[in-house]
Amino acid sequence: MNAFTYYNPTRIEFGRDKENNIGQMIAEQGVKKLLIVYGTGSIKKNGLYNRVIESLKSAGIAYEELDGVVSNPLLSRVQDGIDLVKSHNLQAVLGVGGGSVVDSAKAIAAGALYSGNVWDFFIQKASITAALPVYTIMTLAATASEMNGNSVVMNDTTHQKYSIASVLVNPKISIINPELMMSVPPEYLAYSATDIIAHTIEVYFTATDHPHFQSRLVESIIKTVIETTEILLKDPLNYDARAEFAWASTQALNGLTNSGTGGGNFPNHMIEHALSALFNIAHGAGLSIVIPAWMKWYKAKNTPQFERFAKEVFALDTADEGIAALEQWFRSIKTPTTLAEADIPRERIAEIAENAHGLAVLWGMGETYSAATIAEILQNG
């Protein structure tokens, strides 16, 4: 096991009705006025918005609002939030929604204390040195954004979907109430499951050093996601399954599974970001296309780990059997596994590959993943 530092400052409040106390929790940290960030209105329809507002008012916290965050969050909307924070001298950002909302909240929190363009952080032109406190109430389990310092945003001018990572934007407090996730549509449950699995297998397969304990953590998370997804597709109101799914999601990308590993990277996310940037496909749907295609291309580079995956997750023997089983499971939960199923023309593969290669270079993978190599991988989809 390699040497590592593991530090996660996020306080998780997990369980029923926790969101009703968000105002008091935030007030205890000295915040008196903040920005609420949310999506396209579902929290108003289900009553969550009113409960949050009542909690904030009871705690004496003033607020401004930024709504309209979409599933592939836009830089332009982040900038709107930054402008609101600066013009009203707000002290914190509260994201109420899924990963896209929380990612936007984090980018706003960083951009609000920066004199330049917040996109500078995403293209590594500048480093985050300060950020406003971020708080979250999660309505979708997928990204683990509630317990990490990552944020993914799409530049709606350049069509680049890039990310930042800084412990300074880790949420201070995140509320995970599985009941708030019970209305998630079946297709987005499937996309979420794919995203969670992707978070764990990226380093699991690509690391030059992956301790057995870390492998077991990954396998446990994947098996939990598979099991609970199948339960929830039949019984969306099953609290226990929803709770395990949500907690597995958080553990998949809060730094725990990658501690002590060495040499890993995130090629599937790198390629998928180009798909969703160019075609506005749901992130998880793009991943279920990319993952099997990439696995078929990469398997020979780490055959023992692929064989371990097949055995531990699906009780099978070979790398090919494990890949086929995962691909079949994606099909069984009705998330796409080919470009055609997502209405992405194969004639656009070269364009997708060029877009993805720009991110590969930024992430230090440009030599391994040339545009030609990425195109080759996508041909498997």
Image (cartoon, helix red, strand yellow):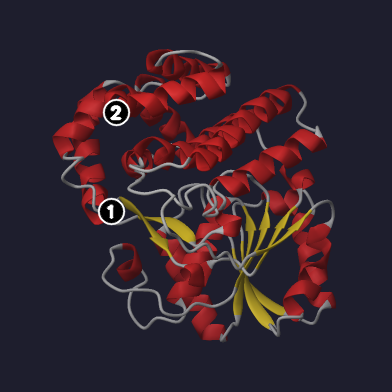
| Residue 281 located left or right of residue 59 | left
Q: Secondary structure at mark 1?
A: loop
Question: x, y (%) of residue 109?
Answer: 51, 73
Question: x, y (%) of residue 83?
Answer: 47, 77
Question: x, y (%) of residue 242?
Answer: 74, 37
Q: Secondary structure at mark 2?
A: helix
- Specify the amino acid type for callout 2: Tyr
- Specify the amino acid type for callout 1: Trp
Q: Could you tell which of marks 1 and 2 lies nearer the N-terminus?
A: 2
- Residue at the spot x=36%, y=83% of the render? 115
Residue, disc 1: 363
Q: CA distance from mark 1 to mark 2?
A: 18 Å
- Residue at the spot x=46%, y=54% of the render? 73
- Residue at the spot x=65%, y=32% of the render? 224
The numbered dot on residue 75 is none
Q: Is 208 or 7 nearer to us in this picture? A: 208
Indicate which label's residue lies in the foreground, 1 or 2: 2
- Residue at the spot x=52%, y=42% of the render? 214
Q: Is 330 or 50 nearer to us in this picture? A: 330
Residue, disc 2: 298
Question: x, y (%) of residue 270?
Answer: 33, 44
Would residue 188 be seen by someone viewing this image from the given angle? no
Within 10 Å of disc 1 (Cα), the crowding (few <14, some 14-19, many 20+) is: some
Q: Name above or below for residue 110 compared with residue 211.
A: below
Q: Name above or below for residue 177 compared with residue 306.
A: below
Q: Is 218 or 346 nearer to us in this picture? A: 218
| Residue 38 located left or right of residue 211 | right
